Amino acid sequence: MTTAQPPFLSSDTSGLQAAAAILQGGGLVAFPTETVYGLGGDATNDHAVAAIFEAKGRPAFNPLIVHFPNAESIWPHVDIEPATQSLVNKLADAFWPGPLTMVLKRRTDSSLSLLVSAGLDTLAVRVPAHDIAHNLLAVVERPIAAPSANRSGGISPTQAAHVRESLGDRIDAIVDGGPCDIGIESTVIALGEGHSALLRPGSITRRDIETIIGPVNVADDQNDEMEPSAPRSPGMLKRHYAPNTRVRLHATQA
């Protein structure tokens, strides 16, 4: 008996319409971004968000990044105090669309599923630069929660075939957009009370960010050798990006 594999969808109009229909119905669709392939679900649908955690085998305390088509669509979901607004605006102008995720205080009346925040009072939000991701967001007409499209703890996928190999029949479809441009997940920065903290490094460096907003702290979680019990951001667990390849140290024989 063979296990059914999720179909590859094209990135043209018909393929994205098919993907959008699945997402609007509460299903899961993997799609390319400029960083890695994301496992997308309707961020306003509790069932869809719960299915993301189940498909990945992801701990429920590990929050998800929510993707939006533009910065303007994010503001109704976050509560930014005046001391932080200037920092957020400068970073959005400099790096969005692009591989930067901001962790901001969540509005209590946000329509997003509480599950994306994993019990925290914050939201991790991003505006992707990839044309396919941008077009999919436009067609689906709702925010998409999308961690990397792989089993939790594994290497993030940069091609559609990697997604199928990792997740198989756990998801409904994969939009095949070829290889991702960057190949590592987005930089994550937390902003609040006029302060900033780098939570996860990425292709946008600390120096890049400091050029825009001045000095940036590095979160204590990154310097702690202990596993954080409730990470403030995706990608902060110590077991992350782990390959399934045998490793031998100081080997003298094959």
Image (tube, rainbow, N blue to C red):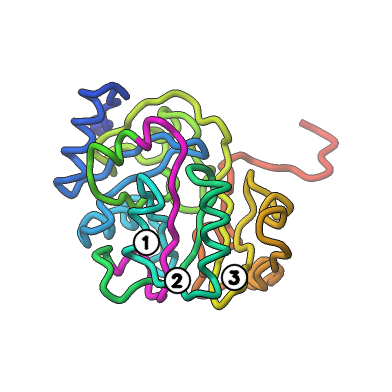
Q: Which residues are magenta?
A: 114-134
> What residue is shown with label 1?
75
Tell me which numbered mark, 1 or 3, is placed earlier along the sequence. 1
Earlier in the chain: of badge 1 and badge 2, it is 1
Q: Quadrant of the N terminus?
A: top left
> Residue, x 25% and y 30% (percent of image)?
16
- Identify the residue at horizontal 38%, vertical 67% (top origin): 78
Q: Is residue 124 on the magenta stretch?
A: yes
- Image position, residue 97 (x, y; %): 48, 43
228 above or below 137?
Answer: below
- Which quarter of the picture shows residue 247? top right
Which mark is drawn over residue 36? none
Image quadrant holding the C terminus, namely top right
Q: Secondary structure at mark 2?
A: loop
Amino acid carrying label 3: it is: Glu
Q: Which residue is mark 2?
A: 80
| Residue bearing mark 3 | 227
On whether residue 102 falls in the magenta region, the answer is no
Q: How many marks?
A: 3
At a point 71% along the width and 69% down the height, the residue shown is 223
Gap in Å between the C-alphas at discs 1 and 2? 8 Å
The answer to which of marks 3 and 2 sits earlier in the sequence is 2
